[in-house]
């Protein structure tokens, strides 16, 4: 049936061609003498047109195939690069590269091997990028691993101090990796986020690392500096004092702890006697713990007149030849020698330490104001 139809088409084309030629001759559309040349010229034109069309179609097809291939490569690169960053984040999340971990029963779990995971991720990356790109990524990955190793080997007492630099450097290398992959993906220059910009963010984060070791020097330095800052904010006339040398000598090794350097202080005038023109000073001083109190600024440091006023401020103030009255803190005791007070947990934490010192200064301010009020009433 199909063969008959095909034959009909062939016969039809032949008949149509013969009729076309006969009509062209009869109606003198073409002269008979030039008909063969006209026919062959038209045939050649058709062949040339067909050849050009074939070439154009082939070129268009090749371009479409190349474009489709480029789109698929781009999408695959996006997928691989994103997967690499997600996996790399998971691997370094705990701050170390785990080779073999322990499960809940404390047995080795060989199914967890972050180093192998990282190697495979780098392999997937290499498959879809250039040699230069993978080498640049490897350099930054190696630096991040070195940063983690260095931070983990840092002494516990120094980790808080090193934390901002650790995160700053880690961010710098991570942003380099992202810039490298983005440049390879989008074929345009990409610069990583500047380290300085990240530092400005880190400064506002109040970074804190939980450690079991207390750095006595660092915490005591902060204590003295912030106590002075907060008292100055309260309006007290204090000449700022740098306690760096005092603290170094305080913690310097000695054979007998009782002979160690101590009893350095903050001192400032807070009241002048109308009768004698003598000045009353307020002192914050340290032995094991810090303590504070009142005394005349000249000798003798105490007498009955000032002692009675201090005792009215609080019966907890204890007089002696050097003090009209001194006491330990009501709520904020800090033993800087043994470093075993609960308050050090707050002082270790940058997010809590300022509030803790403000609490101490509020306590001092309350007693100072009460003293001044009573002294004026008694016309000291």
Image (tube, rainbow, N blue to C red):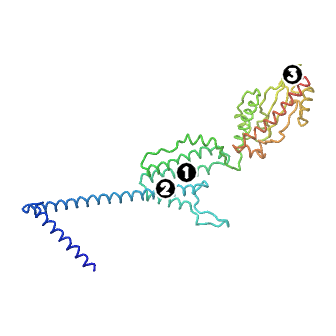
Q: Residue at x 33, y 57 (%)?
A: 63
Mark 1–mark 3 Cα distance, whole angstroms, equals 64 Å
Q: Position of residue 309 (x, y in %)?
A: 91, 29
Q: Which residue is mark 3?
A: 273
Q: Residues within 10 Å of mark 1 (few under 14, many from 20)?
A: some
Q: Earlier in the sequence, mark 1 or mark 2?
A: 2
Q: Residue at x 67, y 65 (%)?
A: 104
Which numbered circle lies on residue 81? 2
For residue 38, side relative to residue 130 (left or right) = left
Tag count: 3
Q: Which residue is mark 1?
A: 146
Q: Residues within 10 Å of mark 2 (few under 14, many from 20)?
A: many
Occupied quadrant, residue 42: bottom left
Occupied quadrant, residue 252: top right
Nearest-to-viewer mark from 2 and 3: 2
Q: Earlier in the sequence, mark 1 or mark 3?
A: 1
């Amino acid at each position: 049936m199909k063969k008959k139809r095909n034959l009909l088409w062939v016969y039809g084309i032949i008949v149509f061609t013969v009729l076309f030629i006969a009509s062209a001759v009869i109606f003198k559309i073409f002269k008979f003498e030039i008909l063969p040349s006209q026919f062959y010229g038209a045939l050649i034109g058709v062949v040339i047109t067909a050849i050009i069309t074939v070439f154009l179609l082939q070129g268009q097809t090749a371009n479409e195939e190349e474009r489709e291939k480029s789109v698929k490569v781009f999408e695959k690169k996006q997928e691989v690069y994103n997967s690499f960053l997600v996996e790399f984040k998971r691997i370094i999340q705990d701050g170390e590269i785990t080779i073999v971990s322990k499960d809940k029963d404390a047995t080795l779990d060989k199914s967890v091997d972050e180093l192998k995971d990282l190697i495979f991720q780098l392999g997937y990356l290499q498959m879809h990028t250039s040699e230069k790109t993978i080498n640049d990524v490897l350099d930054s990955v190696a630096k991040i691993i070195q940063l983690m190793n260095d931070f983990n080997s840092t002494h516990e007492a120094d980790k808080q101090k090193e934390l901002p630099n650790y995160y700053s450097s880690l961010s710098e290398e991570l942003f380099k990796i992202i810039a490298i992959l983005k440049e390879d993906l989008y074929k345009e220059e990409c610069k990583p986020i500047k380290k300085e910009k990240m530092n400005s963010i880190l400064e506002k984060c109040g970074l804190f690392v939980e450690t079991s070791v207390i750095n006595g020097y660092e915490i005591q330095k902060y204590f003295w500096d912030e106590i002075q800052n907060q008292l100055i904010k309260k309006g007290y006339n204090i000449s700022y004092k740098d306690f760096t040398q005092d603290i170094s000598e305080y913690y310097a090794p000695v054979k007998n702890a009782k002979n160690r350097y101590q009893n350095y202080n903050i001192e400032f005038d807070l009241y002048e006697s109308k009768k004698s023109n003598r000045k009353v000073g307020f002192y914050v001083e340290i032995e094991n713990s810090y303590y504070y109190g009142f005394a005349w600024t000249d000798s003798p440091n105490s007498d009955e007149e000032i002692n009675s006023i201090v005792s009215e401020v609080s019966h907890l103030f204890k007089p002696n030849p050097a003090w009209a009255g001194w006491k330990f803190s009501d709520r904020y005791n800090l033993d800087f020698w043994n470093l075993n007070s609960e308050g050090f947990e707050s002082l270790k934490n940058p997010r809590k330490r300022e509030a803790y010192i403000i609490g101490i200064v509020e306590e001092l301010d309350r007693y100072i104001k009460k003293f001044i009020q009573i002294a004026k009433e008694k016309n000291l």
